[in-house]
Amino acid sequence: MRYHALACDYDETLAAEGRVDDGTVAALERLVRSGRQLIMVTGRELEDLLRVFPRLDLFDRVVAENGAVLYRPADQTSTPLAEAPPASLVELLREREVEPLSVGSVIVATREPHGDTVLHAIQELGLEMQMIFNKGAVMVLPSGVNKASGLAAALAELGLSAHSTVGVGDAENDHAFLVACECAAAVANALPSVKERCDLVTEGERGAGVAELAGRIVENDLSEVDVDRHHLLLGTVEDGELRFSPYGLRLLIAGPSHSGKSTVTAALLERIAEAGYQFCLIDPEGDYIEGIEGAVVLGDGRRAPTEDEIIQVLKEPGESVVVNLLGVSLDDRPGFFEGFLPRLSALRARHGHPHWLVVDEAHHMMPDGFGLESVGLLREAGALLMVTVHPAAVSGPVLQTLNAIAVVGESPGDALGTFAAATGQILPPEDFPDLPTGHLLLWQPPAGPLRVELTPPRRERQRHRRKYAIGDLGEAKSFYFRGPHGALNLRAENLAVFCRLADGVDDDTWNHHLRRGDYSRWIAEQVKDEELAAEVAEVEREPGDSAAEARRRVRDLVEDRYTAAATGPG
């Protein structure tokens, strides 16, 4: 389910001449029974609304006074979201015979032609107030208070995201909250300027239009409405930019080591985060210990994250999570993920987020034998991103949930063929040459594979370098100084520790590993830096006059490449 809430304006949207008809109420009742939540967003004062509309019990929250008051129908409590209007302003408007004049908990309201009088009063008193106009109504509120800010407060209390919300309205003061919603709807009687900025316009007017919209949400979750204003940039193709929907994509990023998978993933995560979508990234090897901007990293090499910790953060729709599993033994990581998946799915079923589930090292986390029930939960994710170097090692049923693949690096046809076989697609009979850095093949059947030049992330991330410089690679990937007789067991969990230990071990131990090529092998296989490994291998082949000289050369190579990542920007 994509849309978990409907936010409605009242006058001339739900109501006609202040009243809501029985058919509209019935449509709202059906929407509530579908498990969705209702929020009213109105310019009316609360007492006035309670007098004219007896069915506020249908609504989970009511935003009144054009964003200034939050009301909870379940317990009939309300909270002002800004300070009360200055008494000096109210007194001055009464002195100047502004009629009608309504004073609420926060709002001061009148009608045209008193707009100029109100403006002059605000300027005369030196107040930081704003005027909002709506079909002849003139509303005065503190700066920054509007229907969008009120809706944000309501969604926060309910644990919902605007990205899981449909908004519907008709007039000027609805612009702000409609644009904030994932899908903006206008009833047929809405102002032309409102219709132009909305994603859909109902055929019916007022309550009939809202009933129509509610029915479409219940019946097909507005699946026929492509809200392209939210599409995210991937890169460029021959005829321009290529963008993709933030909902419904189930994408596999595949390619050999050092082929650019991490760059593609970083670019997508950057755009997902910047657009305000919440993601949960499963990071089995600690590749994201530096995190992604706007995300909380839970877990490290010494301590596994708990399910409760992860869920607690994800309950806040504005917070994304990187789940670092280095503290979980290698063999137990797939089980941790599969055991956690039902709780993640339950959170999404209730609140509509996280919007994206991202799984790194998918071949390890979802191998053959991954439970069919868990596969079903993957299908319920709003959007799914999986990354692997071995697509053929990913569970077949998991691959069948995918609807797209992005391939980078050498022999892209191999990964495309695996995807085709798993999903029952027919791969076009053509050659797929190796892809240069920064390019990928995107295949979203039924269209054919498309070559894309990736638009790289704005921030070139140093997460791999920082991880290997000062992170904890875990016991299995650490380097161990053992010596020629196995008498030592000195663990270097990263390159910084490696350099310190190398300076302290005896010459026999140092030379033992040097002659065996252990240093370059570890750097190539575990640090995954083939260029540095080649340089260290040169030292191993020609160590120089002494062990001390070889130590110095290796240390200099490491520090030249990794000191900046370890210390970070000054």
Image: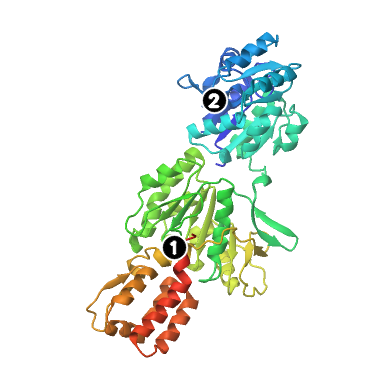
The residue nearer to you, when weighing 387 against 47, is 47
Count of numbered marks: 2
The vertical placement of 236 against 64, above or below, is below
Question: At x 56% / y 64%, what residue is drawn?
Answer: 419
Q: Viewed as shown, does residue 162 lie left or right of 138?
A: left
The spot of residue 397 in percent (x, y) is 49, 58
Q: What kind of element bears circle 2?
A: loop
The residue nearer to you, when weighing 370 against 307, is 307
Whether the residues at callouts 2 and 1 have beta carbons within 8 Å, the answer is no
Question: Callout 1: few (<14), some (14-19), or many (20+) C-alpha neighbours within 10 Å?
Answer: few
The vertical placement of 528 against 232, above or below, is below
Q: What kind of element bears circle 1?
A: helix
Labels 2 and 1: the sequence-earlier one? 2
Q: Which residue is mark 1?
A: 567
The residue nearer to you, when weighing 531 against 342, is 531
The spot of residue 102 in percent (x, y) is 63, 13
Residue 515 visible at all: yes
The spot of residue 183 in percent (x, y) is 64, 38
The vertical placement of 356 against 548, above or below, is above
Q: Which residue is mark 2?
A: 82
Q: Quadrant of the N terminus?
A: top right
Q: Which mark is residue 309?
A: none
Q: Quadrant of residue 8?
A: top right
Q: Nearer the viewer, mark 2 or mark 1?
A: 1
Q: Amino acid at mark 1?
A: Thr
Question: Callout 2: few (<14), some (14-19), or many (20+) C-alpha neighbours within 10 Å?
Answer: some
Mark 2 vs mark 1, CA separation in Å:
44 Å
Q: Amino acid at mark 2?
A: Ala
Residue 53 visible at all: no
Question: At x 48% / y 43%, what residue is drawn?
Answer: 348
Q: Outermost residue toward the left?
A: 487
